[in-house]
Amino acid sequence: MEIFKRYRIKKRYLFLLMAFTLLTLKAEAKYNQTCIVRYTTEEGWSKKYTVDVTFISGTELNEATNSYKYSSYSIYGVIFWGEGRASVIKISNFLSCGSEVTKSCITNTYGDIKGKDQDDDEWKICVSDYCY
């Protein structure tokens, strides 16, 4: 069983490294912004973190990761934490992005952008000066 855990960790590391490389090289249908984010923990909401978030369409994320594991009709927020770690957050808010993610479709929102990551943790992403 231990060998499967190691394989899964190495596979995840390779995936995140590949995703990071492709996301930084490809400049289509994505938007980067420094945001304030929080996520759920067993005790409630985490402290606030100021991080760079890459907003990207599911189609572009699938192309960047050479996979089909992301919904083509969804928008994702990707946060790279370093050392091959990333949070991929599927946005649950309605955003008027269509198939191309732009600054205006991300910043023209009211309140926090909400979503869930690959571990099913809930996230709040604040893209404005007023965070809740």
Image (tube, rainbow, N blue to C red):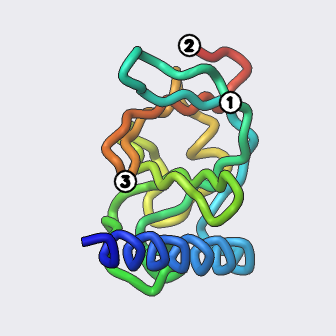
Query: Gap in Å between the C-alphas at discs 1 and 2?
Result: 13 Å
User: Looking at the image, is 83 positioned above or below residue 118?
Assistant: below
Residue at 38% from the left image edge and 33% from the top image edge: 122
Residue at 64% from the left image edge and 23% from the top image edge: 48
**Nearer-the-camera pick, 120 or 83:** 83
Determine whether, in the image, residue 3 is placed left or right of residue 36.
Answer: left
Query: Gap in Å between the C-alphas at discs 3 and 2?
Result: 23 Å
Q: Helix, strand, or loop for circle 3? A: loop
According to the picture, the residue beneath numbered tag 1 turns out to be 49
Residue type pointed to by label 2: Tyr
Q: Helix, strand, or loop for circle 2? A: loop
The C terminus, quarter of image: top right
Residue type pointed to by label 3: Gln
Whichever of labels 3 and 2 marks the residue nearer the N terminus, that label is: 3
Q: Residue 94: give x, y in percent of width and height.
A: 37, 40
Mark drawn on residue 132? 2
